[in-house]
Image (cartoon, helix red, strand yellow):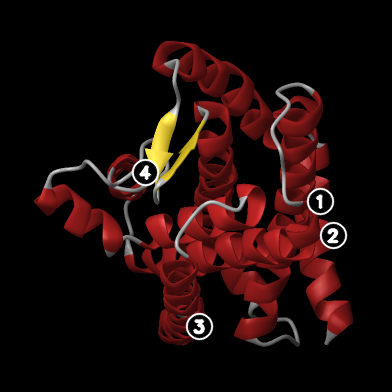
Amino acid sequence: MMRRISAVMYRDMLIRLTSLTWFFFDLAVPLLYLLMFGVGFDKAVGMGVTTAGTSVGYNEFFLAGVLSMSCFGSAVNQAYGFFHDRETGIFYEFMTYPMTRGEYLLGKVLFQCVMSVVQAVLTLGAAVLLLGIRVEFGLLPLTVAAVVAGIAAWFFSLAVFAFRIRRNDTFNTFINVAYFILMFVSSMFYPLDRMPAWLKGAAYVNPLTWHTDVLRYLTIGVGDPSLVLLESALFALFLAASFLFAVHTMKRAV
């Protein structure tokens, strides 16, 4: 089984290495977000932000948002590659090989998980060394696990739409609208404490909020432990449901 999964990962690695510029930006974009937006907003906010009753600088607050955004953005890119494979027929060729749908999905997502872990390590290193953010290194293994879970859940959920949507322009429109709505109706850029009730309610049912809140607690130790535990459980259910639904959709697509 691992040989088949490794073959899918190897193919994705070769695709990345065809463009070293793409490969570099794949790893460096989260770091650039943190340095550009985090530092800029940190200066603008001045006294910092208050979340879960704790006042922190915007750099500290935004760190989890950057990690969550990089997971979501990477899943979007991988889902588009998935859509392209299906559109060009490469996916159907893969399905003639002796591998299951689940193995094919796992190979795709495991490669992106490795990339996302490298992204996270670079971002956390820059946060500590360049911005002086106090990171909870004792929780680093859980942070890495949360990053892996995030990229997997978003890729599986977006893969469902990659198979259900037939037109390229429709898929691009859907991805961009979903990217915009999910990011800005979440706790990624600002705390939810002072949001209007209707927007806060929408944000609390957004899996991107669950993921960001968990990462914020794991990286800087800020958040309500009971709420973070509930959000962790909800995100785990979201991951499991996304994987099962993706495999089911693939079976019907072939």
Res. 13 mark: 1
Tag 2 and tag 4, C-beta contact below 8 Å: no
Label 2 neighbour load within 10 Å: few <14, some 14-19, many 20+: some
Describe the element under mark 3 as helix, strand or loop: helix
Q: Which mark is residue 240?
A: 3
Q: Marks 2 and 3: which is nearer the front?
A: 3
- Name the residue that disc number 4 marks: 183
Rendered view: 135 above or below 93:
above
Structural distance between the alpha carbons of marks 4 and 1: 28 Å
Out of 120 and 217, give the one closest to the viewer.
Answer: 217
Q: Which residue shows up at 37% across the image and 64% down it?
A: 161
Residue 146, x across and y down, in percent: 63, 64
- x 70%, y 23%: residue: 131
Do the CB atoms of the residues marked 3 and 4 lie less than 8 Å apart? no
What residue does disc 2 label?
10
Q: Nearer the viewer, residue 161 or 74?
A: 74
Single out the mark in the foreground, 3 or 1.
3
- The x and y percentages for residue 100 are 66, 87
Point 89% across, 79% down: residue: 3
Q: Is residue 161 above or below residue 244?
A: above
Local SS, label 2: helix
Mark 3 or mark 4: name the one nearer the start of the chain.
4
* Residue 207 left/right relative to 73: left
Q: Are marks 2 and 3 in contact (CB under 8 Å)?
A: no
For badge 2, the amino acid type reads: Tyr
Q: CA distance from mark 3 to mark 4?
A: 22 Å
Residue 89 appears in view: no
Q: Amino acid at mark 4?
A: Met
Find out whether the residues at labels 2 and 1 contact each other: C-beta distance under 8 Å.
yes
**Split into 4 quadrants, where in the image is the N terminus?**
bottom right
Q: CA distance from mark 3 to mark 1?
A: 26 Å
What element does badge 1 sit on?
Answer: helix
